[in-house]
Image (cartoon, grey):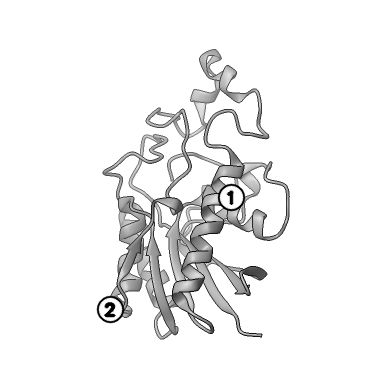
Amino acid sequence: MATTTVHLVRHGQVENPQHVLYGRLPNWHLSELGRAMAARVGEYFDGAPLTHLRCSPLERAQETMAPIAERHSELPITFDDRVIEAGNIFEGQVFGPSNDALRHPSAWRHLLNPFRPSWGEPYREIADRMRAAVHDAAEAAGEGGQAVIVSHQLPIWIARLDAEGRPFFHDPRARQCSLASVTSLTVAEGTVIRVAYTEPAADLLPQSSSRRFRVGL
């Protein structure tokens, strides 16, 4: 059975000392550490038989894709709004290192339904757009090919839950999708048959990011 592999890459660390939930806002760029993470991902795919590149239009995703694209200069980059960050009504707010914005009473009405979730883009909509993008990337890569999609933590995690047939409701701290990680979906006849996960930049991860969920990374 012929298969295609679609690698979902999360972008590297963003320069964001105030812990703003930047979401889809423009002009948020990788930090120095984030650029080192992106370089490590580029090294991870060096020599890989990639046949398609696809990327979120946000700057941090493009900057993470750059070292990969440099090693595969024969491949154009397809920019795809379907793999953009999830929508969130708290976008632009300063959360601080302990997510203090969520403690304010004005935020509570947006936290009533974690299954939807009530604070942002529904999980089902994220799953639908990511599934379509993965399908198109697999088609573009061709049988036996490999595609890379650079996206964002929540869309990648929801795509994985969707592929594995698991419920979308989850604890954000339990997402297996660290900065600059690679979630690889093996696709056969339009269906994901295997999921693998690796962290090429594991040794570069900030210690705190592996212990608790924080916005603005």
Please name the residue shown 60% across and 42% down the image: 123
How many residues crowd around disc 1 within 10 Å: few (fewer than 14), some, or many (20 or more)?
Answer: many
Q: Can residue 200 be seen at all in this image of the molecule?
A: no
Based on the displayed image, in which of its 4 quarters is residue 162 positioned? bottom right
Q: Which mark is residue 73?
A: 2
Label 2 to label 1: alpha-carbon separation: 30 Å
Q: Does 185 sit left or right of 153 as displayed?
A: right
User: What amino acid is at disc 1?
Assistant: Ala
Q: Give SS at disc 1.
A: helix
Q: Quadrant of the N terminus?
A: bottom right
Q: Does 181 sit left or right of 27 as displayed?
A: right
Give the residue furthest to the top: 105
Q: Give SS at disc 2.
A: loop
Q: Does 61 sit left or right of 202 as displayed?
A: left
Q: Earlier in the sequence, mark 2 or mark 1?
A: 2
Q: Position of residue 12 (x, y in %)?
A: 40, 57
Q: Which mark is residue 21?
A: none
